[in-house]
Image: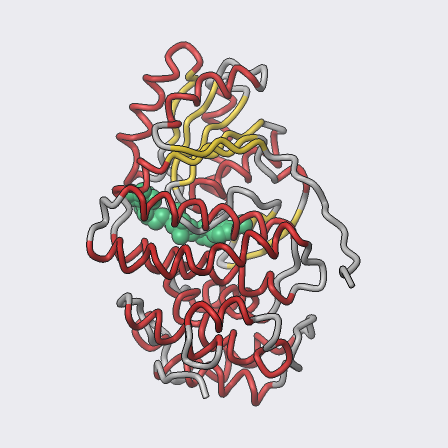
């Protein structure tokens, strides 16, 4: 019998293809806006500049100061620039860091957002914003955070470095993985997440051979869209909690941390929801979702050990304490011993048992 579900609907307009960057001015006009502030990281400033030129009279300026974890002081500076330029919307060109800055501006000013994602991290389809102030990261959900328009241009991902291609894709798979057992999952998130598994399985080895492979880039970006949509519609559990703790309290890098944790958090929940994780075990083999992801990650040269990301053996107890301090919904009971063991396995890079 078909399971009962609620589909929350989609409020974000999505444009997907090759060369879709040309459509940015039209999408800005379609929103009824005429003064766009283009956002980027310092690394992608030249691309932001070129986009501002393409926007012509519709460009109000550039702010190329986006940075990881959306520090509030950067947002304050960006809003000052936004106001000084008399801008009426933001165009965020980049990965999750740039999208985060656009969201932080939008939730404070009401600015419309056009997001052009260039990684697979998946912030663009969500109503989630994580921000840091005084060394602490807090996350909130609010409909005002969700972007109005997302433009996926496959060609912009051709320059994504291979290491970030791999970790970012595993970050996306983590959204799908937790989406498979989320209590509020729906047939759309399930279907897109299911399709994303073989797409990433096939695209990543192809991109390792040739990062310019347009077909594989398109496959990966389409899969990332599905995973982002899933993240934006359902409740996350253990995996995202642990990634948040390690990023927020120990300063570990975002995509790499997701990549290392993924096989272990998957394996942790497998005894409780193995049948829901079949799209993963069927795709990646090795008889279990956790093991399959571990072997896949290894085969595409992903980072495998928290020890290599800057965590120390002394941090493990405190990380387990923080991660288990506030109870949260998770398919398999979250225990201090269980999480401590998981962290040790991820620290050492062992295949999950
Ligand atoms: P990122 O945005 O920090 O990008 C990493 C680096 O790669 C940057 O220097 C960037 O300019 C560069 N880069 C990005 N795309 C490129 C490309 N195509 N070619 C060349 N260089 C490129 O990394 P990320 O992993 O995309 O984002 C991480 C951030 O996103 C974290 O702060 C995380 O918390 C946030 N995030 C938020 C959500 C959400 O829903 N709120 C979801 C996922 C990630």
Query: At 49% across and 46% down in the image, what residue appears?
Result: 225
Q: Position of residue 99 (x, y in %)?
A: 47, 40
- Quadrant for the N terminus, please: bottom right
Q: Quadrant of residue 260?
A: bottom left
Q: Which sits in the foreground, 261 or 12?
A: 12
Task: Specify whether 217 is left or right of 147.
Answer: left
**Does residue 65 sit above or below 67 in this rendering?**
above
**Does residue 33 sit above or below 344 in this rendering?**
above
Q: Is residue 69 visible?
A: no
Q: Which sits in the foreground, 248 or 134?
A: 248
Query: At 49% across and 43% down in the image, what residue appears?
Result: 100
Q: Quadrant of residue 349?
A: bottom left
Q: Position of residue 242 (x, y in %)?
A: 52, 70
Q: Position of residue 59 (x, y in %)?
A: 42, 17
Query: At 28% across and 40% down in the image, what residue appears?
Result: 43
**Does residue 182 sit above or below 95 in this rendering?**
below
Q: Position of residue 214 (x, y in %)?
A: 28, 42
Q: Which sits in the foreground, 45 or 8?
A: 8
Q: Is residue 114 visible?
A: yes
Count every numbered label the image shows and give the total: 0
Q: Which residue is the extreme one toward the top?
A: 57
Q: Which residue is the extreme one toward the front?
A: 1
**Does residue 274 sit above or below 140 in this rendering?**
below
């Amino acid at each position: 019998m078909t399971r009962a579900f609620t589909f929350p609907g989609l409020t974000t307009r999505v444009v997907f293809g090759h060369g879709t960057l040309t459509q940015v001015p039209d999408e800005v006009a379609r929103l009824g806006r005429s003064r766009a502030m283009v956002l980027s990281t310092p690394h992608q400033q030249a691309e932001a500049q070129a986009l501002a030129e393409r926007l012509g009279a519709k460009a109000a300026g550039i702010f190329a100061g986006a940075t990881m974890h959306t520090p509030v002081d950067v947002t304050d500076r960006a809003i000052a620039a936004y106001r000084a330029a008399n801008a009426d919307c933001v165009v965020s060109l980049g990965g999750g860091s740039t999208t985060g800055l656009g969201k932080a501006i939008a939730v404070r000013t009401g600015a419309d957002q056009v997001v052009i994602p260039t990684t697979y991290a998946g912030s663009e389809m969500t109503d989630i914003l994580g921000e840091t102030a005084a060394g602490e990261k807090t996350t909130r959900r609010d409909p005002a955070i969700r972007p109005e328009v997302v433009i996926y241009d496959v060609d912009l991902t051709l320059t994504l470095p291979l290491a970030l291609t791999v970790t970012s894709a595993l970050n996306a798979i983590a959204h799908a993985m937790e989406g498979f057992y989320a209590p509020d999952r729906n047939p759309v998130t399930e279907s897109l997440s299911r399709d994303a598994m073989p797409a990433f399985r096939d695209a990543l080895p192809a991109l390792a051979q040739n990062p310019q492979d347009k077909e594989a880039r398109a496959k990966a970006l389409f899969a990332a869209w599905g995973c982002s949509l899933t993240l934006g519609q359902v409740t996350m559990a253990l995996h995202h909690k642990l990634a948040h703790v390690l990023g927020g309290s120990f300063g570990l890098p975002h995509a790499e941390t997701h990549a290392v944790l993924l096989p272990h958090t998957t394996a942790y929940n497998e005894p409780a929801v193995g049948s829901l994780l079949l799209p993963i075990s069927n795709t990646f083999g090795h008889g279990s979702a956790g093991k399959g992801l571990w072997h896949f990650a290894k085969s595409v040269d992903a980072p495998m050990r928290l020890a290599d990301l800057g965590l120390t053996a002394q941090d493990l107890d405190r990380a387990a304490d923080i991660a288990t301090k506030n109870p949260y919904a998770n398919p398999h009971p979250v225990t201090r011993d269980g999480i401590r063991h998981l962290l040790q396995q991820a620290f050492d890079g062992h295949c999950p048992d």
